[in-house]
Amino acid sequence: MAVVPASLSGQDVGSFAYLTIKDRIPQILTKVIDTLHRHKSEFFEKHGEEGVEAEKKAISLLSKLRNELQTDKPIIPLVEKFVDTDIWNQYLEYQQSLLNESDGKSRWFYSPWLFVECYMYRRIHEAIIQSPPIDYFDVFKESKEQNFYESQESVIALCTHLQQLIKTIEDLNENQLKDEFFKLLQISLWGNKCDLSLSGGESSSEKTDVLNSLEDLKPFILLNDMEHLWSLLSNCKKTREKASVTSVYIVLDNSGFELVTDLILANFLLSSELATEVHFYGKTIPWFVSDTTIHDFNWLIEQVKHGNHKWMSKCGADWEEYVEMGKWVYHDHIFWTLPHEYCAMPQVAPDLYAELQKAHLILFKGDLNYRKLTGDRKWEFSVPFHQALNGFHPAPLCTIRTLKAEIQVGLKPGQGEQLMASEPCWWTSGKYGIFQYDGPL
Ligand SMILES: O=P(O)(O)OC[C@H]1O[C@](O)(CO)[C@@H](O)[C@@H]1O
Ligand SMILES: [Mn+2]
């Protein structure tokens, strides 16, 4: 087996991982507890005293979790039976087996960051499902919805742009079509700035005019493989036989504004015939604050459809139709909310790996996907992306991510070191972005 570097971890005092575990995660937990408190009367109205008792139970489980984390207690197995409980508990055992510490117990600050951060969100879910009748409650729903509402102006601008573009799409020459494709790819990239986990759950909506900012943002694209995406898809379009398909898979990240940018891109892929179908992968449980679940996906399309603007509602109606016609297909799979790096997918979720192998292109949105693609490890900056994927090559793939974790591969020699010297937070602030492709050229 190939030798891989160590995992990022809270052990490295002062690192972004350390600060996330020390500050950001407890802050998110506190927000979750507050949210439950604020919904007390709603739970009472819906379920009477039982609802209030359930709210108390969930809060006490979450307070216990916060205490375990803040006092660096051992990571304990999950107790509530759910579809993935056994896989999680096996993974916990596996993590313990890697330790050679005196008591051999995984701890928050001493375990891989990717593992403990995922575990925290899974424990939040456990607290909720252990508390019926409020076991359906998405503690992050409100903030996801707020992010969407606060981005209204940008959403309208994007929908209007798309609808104008579609009107004349058949008259565009190759170069014009390519330019439009690149524009929408960049919008989807910068849409990833709007996640709510980096901001500790605080509002992080899109208030600037993204469309008119693209030129100014170009210098912040550190790796730009957009040309490869164009060659691949335009080739598929040219060589495709009648009635055959080109399918693009989008492994979604955040709901709210980012999801709008992804759906705009997906709409363009169909309208331009660069793809004939788009498959979306979302999360089965509320995840990293703002990640998209099936409820968020449906909710957002419904909101866009009922938006108070002609082109916005046209987009929403079209999107609903794509779903009905099967041109857009939403999938979820428990693997996306497990702590495993993606190179483990063939063993842990062979069915999902086999599904992904059918794609002509897979787009992985966001920072967490990048961490899982590269194993969240301390790779040298200049290590090729293909190598960091560590055997995960289901189909041609591209990561579209703004940098929010101390990991980046595939840079030119010296590039990472130079950025480090001039701007220490370059890889955690979300200011920079990448399109990084792996596949046949
Ligand atoms: O929504 P995204 O782009 O995956 O970002 C989530 C990110 O939030 C953080 O976990 C911060 O807690 C990042 O380090 C993480 O990768
Ligand atoms: Mn996210």
Image (cartoon, grey):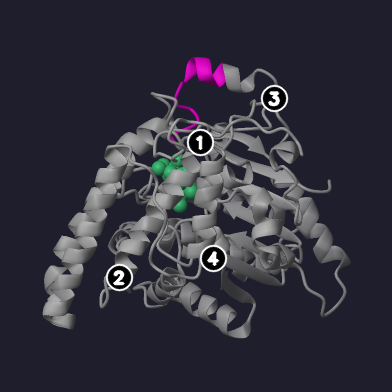
Spatial CA span between label 1 and label 3: 22 Å
* Closer to us: 238 or 405: 405
Kind of residue at disc 2:
Phe
Sequence-wise, the earlier of marks 2 and 4 is: 2
Earlier sequence position, callout 1 versus callout 4 = 1
Label 2: how many Cα within 10 Å (few below 14, some 14–19, many 20+): some
Q: Which callout, 1 or 3, points to the residue nearer the camera?
A: 3
Q: Do the residues labelled 1 and 3 touch (CB within 8 Å)?
A: no
Give 375 or 248, whichever is nearer the viewer: 375
Image height check: is 201 above or below 162? above
> For residue 122, which quarter of the picture?
bottom left
Q: Which of marks 2 and 3 is in front?
A: 2
Q: Distance of mark 1 from mark 4, alpha carbons? A: 39 Å
Location of mark 1 (residue): 216
Q: Give the range drawn in magenta.
A: 418-429
CA gap, disc 1 and disc 2: 41 Å
Q: Is residue 51 left or right of residue 180?
A: left
Q: What element carries label 3?
A: loop
Q: Distance between the residues labelled 2 and 3?
A: 46 Å
Q: Residues within 10 Å of mark 3 (few under 14, many from 20)?
A: some
Image spot of residue 59 (x, y percent): 20, 59
Which of the two discs, 2 and 3, labels the residue nearer the N terminus? Answer: 2
Q: Can you tell which mark lies on residue 334?
A: 4
Q: Is mark 4 on a helix, strand or loop?
A: helix
